Image: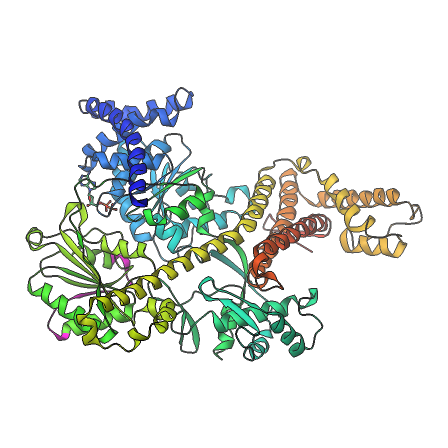
Amino acid sequence: MKQKIDSIINSMRLSRLEKTLRKINEYSTKFESFTDEALQQKTSDFKQRLKDGKVTLNQLLPEAYAVAREASRRVLGMYPKEVQVLGAIALHEGNIAEMQTGEGKTLTATMPLYLNALTGRGAFLITTNDYLAKRDFLEMKPLYEWLGLTSALGFVDIPDYEYKKGEKKAIFNHDIIYTTNGRLGFDYLIDHLADHIDDKFLPDLNFGIIDEVDSIILDAAQTPLVISGAPRVQSNLFNITKGFVDTLVEDEHFEMKKSKKEIWLTEKGIQAANDYFNVENIYGEKYFDLVRNINLALRARHLFESNYDYFINNGEVVLIDRITGRMLPGTKLQSGLHQAIEAKEDVEISRDLSVMATITFQNLFKQFDEFSGMTGTGKSGEAEFFDLYAKVVIQIPTDKPIQRIDYKDRVFLNINIKNKAIIEEVKRLHEAQRPVLLITRTAEVAKYFSTQLFQMDIPNNLLIAQNVAKEAQMIAEAGQLAAVTVATSMAGRGTDIKLDRKVHELGGLAVIISEHMENSRVDNQLRGRAGRQGDPGTSQVFISLDDFLVQRWGETALNKNKQLQSMDNSKLEHSRVFQRRVHKVVTRAQRVSEEQGVAMREIANEHEKSISIQRDLVYKERDKVLSLKNVDDFNLQSLARDVFKEDFILKHNQITESLLLDYIYKNISFKFDGDLSTINITNKSEVLEFLMEQFNKQLSENKAQLKDDYFHLRFTQKSILKAIDSGWINQVDNLQQLKGSVNNRQNGQRNAIFEYHKVALESFEYMGSKIKGNVVKNLCQSIITYDDGDLVIHFP
Ligand code: ADP
């Protein structure tokens, strides 16, 4: 029923797009006969009309798309098909366009990129890795150039490349940029650490198209991008709290929702903590760090499992990518969690770095005025796309009907029997000369199959996500006669598998998946490797009760089922009922896994809400400071007045000479030797005016040391930025730590998020006043020197 309604809604959406398509087709016919020059002339015409306000982008769309379409025939030798044009319209409107593998998303994106770049405000294509960004850019660049627009790869493709001054700015000065989500995210963060307007390089993010949008926004969204700063003061609590947590009993001292990665102390647990640490109430203000560490230790102990979430490798905790099962050396969990796991595993505790700047991908894309996404598997993520961004998924029909057959899962009791069957199946297909793509969850399993196959004299290519470019080439060959390719799920993504002619007759590529992945969307991505552009092909998943998903999420269902536990394989092989039961256990486990993914992203998003509101405010303020051109525009007088009032005057009931002196020394001038007898110290407004006088005196002394207006401006800017940045960096790090601590505050379970936002807001207000105070301090107490004619400021 739901499917039916979905399909009706989708056809309604499509029929709206089709109306526009007809207009485009009319223009297309007309432009066929244009000379190259006349067609190329269109770009500047469009630009002019937009500039003069004569048309909107929406009005221009049909004509502009027809121009881009005709140009791509002439330049690239490819004429965008109607389904591609439909996808292109959906993309301009800011939707998620679901287009199957091989339908030509790269070419589709050129139309909305061209249209949106006509405003001169830039357009981005964002994809998952450097290789794909570069490949797509190089392929499409001639088209944009022919049309009179500029385009660039958003980065220099050399490892650890050091950008020269102004180089990034030059890159982003192009009309159309191809880059990756990771690169863009870091660029965004770095851009907002610039302390001179000329060092800023990123334009306003106007329009972006995200390729493989579900991978980027949903699958890869758990861990935010982080720029690390100084090492944090190391806590010695990791081992101490670990000792405590080891004494606790589930359901008595703590409860947990494993699927949501939530764990908290019960009343009894809190009492136990009070006793253990000999404190009155661990939730008292001063035990913040202790509680945080107890929580970290609890999570490390019960929510993270060795060999599932991480391995111990040479005495180090190495994380595992939950989707691909790949090891992620060098990646660390944030805010002490990594250290807590190290304590749990009794390995050396590594340094915990503070967080300087951070953003999630979800929020990165919210910085765009408009963005859209394309993917082969958008539909099953629709609810999340809608919740997050109010975006709908439009399913674009394929150019030719899909011929791929997705066979029912094959069911086995355990891993050994299953693996044997997989190998037999590969052998059978190989003997018939059909190409086989065998996909596994982890590199280890891929290696195992590859070796087994070699031993049976079946040559095969092994792809375990190591060298993206090489893999792309290898996977491109996976459709040749009798080719056998063993790959992990990530390997060779985004690369088209073309079939040998003879392979068509044999039934196309056979995709065999050695177990279900963390969510069915990834399964579908994998199935989609076969049957591109109306090719024949098949896909089939092999499952068993030893599969990762079952071990991870399905144990309870399995344990409850006594019959399944005592079953032997011969029974299973011959009983459909048992097969169905096993299948049910596996599907259920996958559903739990999917729900857990959604829940984790929800929590991450909730946390990010506070950070992102605050980040926007701070970044705006920063940008304002950077763009001011005149010291008088800063309104330092009223700022200083506020600071003196809040930090000093209102803080003391009675002001004494020694209090005042102390404040002046610490905040305005440590060389102060003025006369306090001239003022009436009991009169607060007089004291305030006196402070203002001292402040202004100090400012003019500083000004005298600054060679000219430019240096004066730079000094003022830098003093303010320094205060903002240290305040903000501190706050980001606080928030990061707060995430981990808040969800097991007392009674906190239901209100954890509320509590988080509340504390986040309080600390933000505190940060604000701290920043203002530091601005005054920086302006007054910095030491100004010159190095080679350049201003060097030593901040207090
Ligand atoms: P997707 O990203 O949707 O899987 P690609 O963009 O990689 O697909 O394109 C698949 C293949 O189809 C590429 O070889 C591309 O050059 C080709 N192609 C795309 N559109 C057209 C077209 N309109 N005419 C001819 N070939 C096309």
Of the 4 image quadrants, the one containing the C terminus is bottom right
Residue 435 visible in the current orientation = yes
Residue 579 x/y as whole percent: 23, 67
Residue 339: say if magenta.
no
Coloration of the structure image = rainbow
Q: Which residues are magenta?
A: 455-470
**Front residue of this view, candidates 202 and 265:** 265
Q: What residue do we see at 42% from left, 66% from top?
A: 330
Residue 144's quadrant in the figure? top left
Reply above or below: 258 against 57: below
Residue 42 x/y as whole percent: 29, 24
**Front residue of this view, candidates 641 and 331:** 331
Q: Is residue 373 left or right of residue 277?
A: left
Q: Is residue 45 left or right of residue 658?
A: left
Residue 707's quadrant in the figure? top right
Ligand 1 visible in quadrant: top left
Residue 468: say if magenta.
yes
Of the 4 image quadrants, the one containing the N terminus is top left
